[in-house]
Amino acid sequence: MAALPQDVPEFLKDAFWQEYSRWCGFGAELDGPLGRVAAATRSDPALLRLAWHCYWRVFLSPEPCPPGDWPEPVAQLGDDAGLFYVLIALAFVPLMQQRHREWKFPEEVTRQTAQQVSRYCQDTYRRGNQGRTGIYLGQLGWLRHYTRERYVRLGRLEYWLGPNPYHLEVYRHRGSRQVVALAPDGTHFAADGTIYRDAKDYREGEGWTTAITRDDTSVSGFLVDPNGRGTRQRVVLPLADWACTLQHGDHCLMLHIPSGGAMTPEACRQSLTEAASFFSRHFPRELPLAVVCTSWIFSPQLLEIFPPEANLCQFQRNLFLFPVASAPWDGLWFVFLKHGPINLDTAPAETSLQRGVLDYLRRGHRWRLAGMFYLLDDVPAFGSEPYRSQWPPPIF
Ligand SMILES: CC(C)(COP(=O)(O)OP(=O)(O)OC[C@H]1O[C@@H](n2cnc3c(N)ncnc32)[C@H](O)[C@@H]1OP(=O)(O)O)[C@@H](O)C(=O)NCCC(=O)NCCS
């Protein structure tokens, strides 16, 4: 409240939402409702303070502290209540623009990236709210990153340049160019090569624990199967033959997948190609080595559920999938819009994705999410399944 402007906050003024709703991909159909919500918020001291407090928490707070389970102001705004937080979401555009200008990103890239707000509203919130317009607070909170990180949408996918958060180590053979990954030191795998988030989920004495050891001439560790499993196969890689090509802390592109379907292999290939050249052009001293991500989208279980030609299956087969610690419902919010356990009898089964996952869970499978990496040196080989086609590795 100490930072509340004397005048009306910029993002509640009509000229502001009129300009930035277009940047975010909304058309004139939302002008009437947005205008009503902005006017009602300006004239109600409690709403105005709530809006400011939310804006401050999402965008200005020195530490992230996004709103949690806050209500929509239905009593004040009736059917328009969902737009209250959309108005705040629009405010990410000028903050992002300012960073993008400093980095000299083309305006077209900023415009593409700003579309995320309408995607959140139209593809996600609307699906879970009988066609109404609004934004989930978790997604509103995520917009903070766009205003601080080197975070852009390039074609179908979004990327964020930063240090690699993963601890697996990736090596490339200097001759054959083959790629292998060693599981992070001290990982405990279940018997099937997966990792439980909760230690209580392991059966007594189950599985094995990995180690990475090194000396001046070699590194030794447990191979990861690019189909997304840990293995018990321990290998010694002579460093004269194998170069470390990705490790914790290296410059990387964290991948984000905006909603909207149509993740065709061609769209993914084009986006990866653009990302490799965009970031090397803009940040030549922080050349990213790989694209990395954890998501439900990389669960190898999707390959058991959907036909090989499904977009997500084709994407997965091109990547190096690896297991990450997972609880049984992790990531499924994006499919069912519900946190925590899914009731298999009442969960929405409106799309082939929802039906496929529900069927799979009804057959007694436990869900898990997974990680992936794709080395940027391999972008020209995208489409040829470069990691799977080399598995199991012939040279051990
Ligand atoms: C990831 C995503 C883009 C994949 O798209 P895709 O596989 O190319 O999607 P398609 O357009 O081929 O759709 C395939 C089917 O899945 C459905 N579907 C797609 N995304 C869905 C979702 N998030 N929830 C429920 N169903 C979904 C489609 O309606 C379609 O169903 P139909 O066959 O009954 O018509 C898509 O799932 C999506 O928009 N997800 C939300 C964003 C997300 O999860 N991001 C990652 C966060 S970690």
Image: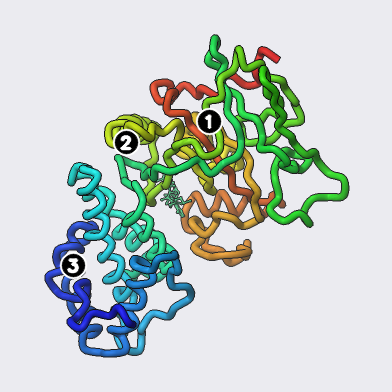
What residue sits 66% from the left and 34% below the top? 183
- 331 lies above or below 16: above
Q: Quadrant of the C terminus?
A: top right
- 83 lies above or below 273: below
**Of the image marks 3 and 2, the number of the one nearer the N terminus:** 3
**Of the image marks 1 and 3, the number of the one nearer the N terminus:** 3
Q: Which mark is residue 29?
A: 3
**Residue located beneath label 2 in the image:** 283
- Between 329 and 220, the one nearer to me in the picture: 220
Gap between marks 3 and 2 measured at Cα: 39 Å
Closer to the observer: label 1 or label 3? 1
- 370 lies above or below 90: above
Gap between marks 1 and 3 measured at Cα: 48 Å
Q: Quadrant of the N terminus?
A: bottom left
- Between 326 and 267, the one nearer to me in the picture: 326
The x and y percentages for residue 94 are 22, 60
- 186 lies above or below 115: above
Splitting the image into 4 quarters, where does residue 339 fall?
bottom right
Q: Which mark is residue 246?
A: 1
Amino acid type shown at disc 2: Phe
Neighbor class of circle 2 (other Cα within 10 Å; few <14, some 14-19, many 20+) is: few
